Amino acid sequence: AETEGYDLNLRHVRWPKDLKIAHDRVMNERAERQKRERDAKEQEKNRRLREAFMEIAEKLRWMCWAEDEISIRVCFAPEELDTEGRVLSHCVATYKEKHARGDSAIFFIRRAKDRDNPWYTLELDLKELRVIQNRGKANCARTPEVEAFETKWLEFVKENWATHNK
């Protein structure tokens, strides 16, 4: 209670009628405060990285591609990585700085009929033009269909890399 700013000189704080209820209330308040602090830090990080994300997206926009009812596009904003990680239950949101620096690039693979819903997330090594990872829900491996799409897309990228990166 003291670390959460409660005055332990107050009798009802020091000696609550129901210790468990008082304890749970303070722990819930602490969890809410910590969540607000984490969210504020994340919003600040996103604000700081947004311009770099837009620059990377403009540079790699040509890599957006579709075939056989599947599409792929580059990540445009740090908030997209938050959503992608939350919906697919994986850690892509921790790759924000890596993407912003251009060490690797994050792409979203979608079903053409359902472009707004996360399906697979691909990380591309921009120096070697190789897929580092491509994961779906709860880090599941890609299906044969997605793997075939990835192979064709990567061929397209390699064939056109020199043209777009002079």
Image: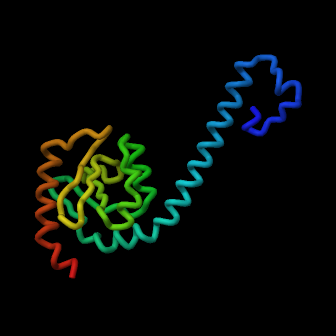
Judged from this view, the residue extending furthest toward the top is: 18
Q: Nearer the viewer, residue 73 or 59?
A: 59
Residue furthest to the bottom in view is 166
Q: Is residue 25 left or right of residue 165?
A: right
Residue 163: image location, x then y, percent? 17, 79
Asked where in the image residue 35 lies, by quadrant, the reply is top right
Compared with residue 67, is residue 15 higher up or lower down, i.e. above or below?
Answer: above
Residue that appears at 28% across and 70% down: 60
Q: Position of residue 70 (x, y in %)?
A: 21, 53
- Residue 28, located in which quarter of the rendered image? top right
Task: Assign the N terminus to one quadrant of the image.
Answer: top right
The residue that appears at 83% across and 31% down in the rendered structure is 8
Q: Residue at x 77, y 39 (%)?
A: 5
Asked if residue 40 is positioned above or below residue 11 in the image, the reply reads below
Work out whether 30 lies above or below 148.
above
Residue at 22% in and 78% down: 165
